[in-house]
Amino acid sequence: MREIAPLRILALRAVGPPGCQPEVTFGGPPRPTNKKKDGDTIETKNNNNTDNNDETTNSTTEFDPPLPPDESTMASRLLRSLRNSSMTIQPYVAGTTRANASDVDISQPWVMAIYPPRDNDDNNNSPIDETNEFLSIENGNHAVECLQMFIDALVESGRAGDDRLGVHFFREWVQAVTGGMEAKPEQQQQKQRPKKKQKGNSNSSRQFDHLPLGSLSLHNLASASIHTFRSMEYANVGSCLGTLDLTGTHGLTDSILTNVICSGSFPRLQRLSLKNSRKLTGKAVASLVKLRDLRAFDVGGCFNIHPNDVIEMVQQHPGTRKGTLTEIYAGGLGWTDVALETLLSFTSKHIKGLGIGFSTYLSGPGMILILTKAAGTLDRLSIPFCTGVDDAVASALGKALPKLAVLDIRGCNKVYSLTGMMDGRIAAGNSGAEVARHLFVLARYSGISNNSLEETSRLYRNELGEPVFHCVLDGGGTGGGVRR
């Protein structure tokens, strides 16, 4: 007897076979009134010209978004029934190409969270209990998961493009997140957008507070351009978008980030990854100050951005004064001791996650002295490929940062053992400091050997005889550092 595929797989097949056009799948056959040659010309320009941002942005304001279909399509009805199904949440399996060394990061996958949700922040310092916990899309459901699987499949197949992800697709995503709850009509939002971008951000955020928040990943969608983000805007994605992963979105530019994402159309964004979006400059970082609800951002690998750009934005962001901007990941920008000290001077009381890796300018003694200021809150630290880190520095950090639960020391080839760090944590505990129950370490390309790791593991165990740390020396560990 032929095996019947799971419902999620059947839904994915209905939404995204190789020849699928989501705009037809969710919007029905194109209407004659929407076939405009001028619009087609504009879209072609958008796909092929993402460098000339001002011209592209101005031209797309003339784009007339298609109206919703008079009657929901079969695929839409299937997804909506999937959202309301009573099936249990299952671990989300992202694309196979993500499980490699470049994507093993303490904050990746960006849109994932531990399920079931943990009760309090204290539990976030403990590892995933694989018997009853797993990673799934943050605030997700089966319909959202299906649409995300479609995006991931498009990216991996190389068939992604602006013509595959349009207004109808993102309308369906909003429907999957909100379940059809009433939001502000798109037409009214479009009328207000040109004049009330900057000062209306806070108010526009509050009017959507009754809607649930969702998570969306366009990870490595290199072909995404202004048309993709305008489609998201016209579909009112910002009304219910809390987490957005734009890692490796090479079509993302200063103009798109400033005039679309940070213009007031995405007022509820709390977590934003711009990692490896290499066309971005300091102008793009400065615009993040308009995202008033922002709690975490990642600009690592954006080599046109300088540490001072990050410092100035964080200093001016309202979340810094409120203590809500708690995660800053900015590796690969060339951090120095002076820049790090400046950043910690106004974030040390509330920062929980920090990424400053890939720097030859950070000294070991400097890091110890500066990071100690954040000892009361810092529990995630990423310092990969920092030449100033050695065994002595690791030992000192173990004592200075007792709450540390996740550490990335990949490429620190002067670190040969974790014994010193564990000794430092014990010393901190003996001094009365609150020490995290477990430490997760990424140490690929470091000087730590398997023999050294086994020896340290034998020495440091809890009352149940279990190791109090877990260290990854190979390309595994994807998602192991997620603590939310």
Image (tube, rainbow, N blue to C red):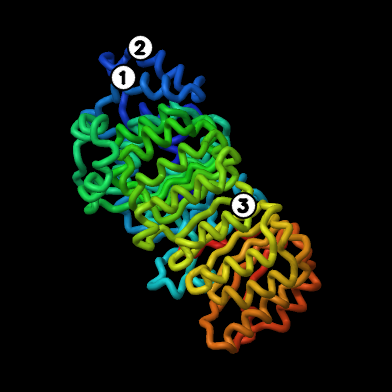
The secondary structure type at the circle numbered 2 is helix
**457 vs 146: above or below:** below
When the figure is inspected, residue 109 is found, relative to residue 480, above or below; the finding is: above
Q: Are marks 2 and 1 in contact (CB under 8 Å)?
A: yes
> Which residue is the site of mark 2?
38
Image coords of residue 44 (percent x, y) = 45, 17
Say if 194 sits above or below 420 in the image: above
Q: Residue at x 56, y 60 (%)?
A: 341
Residue at left offset 49%, top offset 74%: 376
For the C terminus, the quadrant is: bottom left
Q: Residues within 10 Å of mark 3 (few under 14, many from 20)?
A: many
Crowding near the residue tagged with mark 1, few <14, some 14–19, many ≥20 C-alpha atoms within 10 Å: few
Dot 2: within a 10 Å radius of its alpha carbon, few (fewer than 14), some, or many (20 or more) residues?
Answer: few
Residue 335, which numbered label?
3
Distance between the alpha carbons at the discs numbered 2 and 3: 47 Å
Name the residue beneath numbered marker 1.
Answer: 62
Mark 3, mark 1: which one is toward the viewer?
3
User: Residue 347: x percent and y percent?
Assistant: 46, 62
- Depth check, mark 2 against mark 3: the one in front is 3
Rounded to the nearest angstrom, the CA distance separating label 2 from label 1 is 9 Å
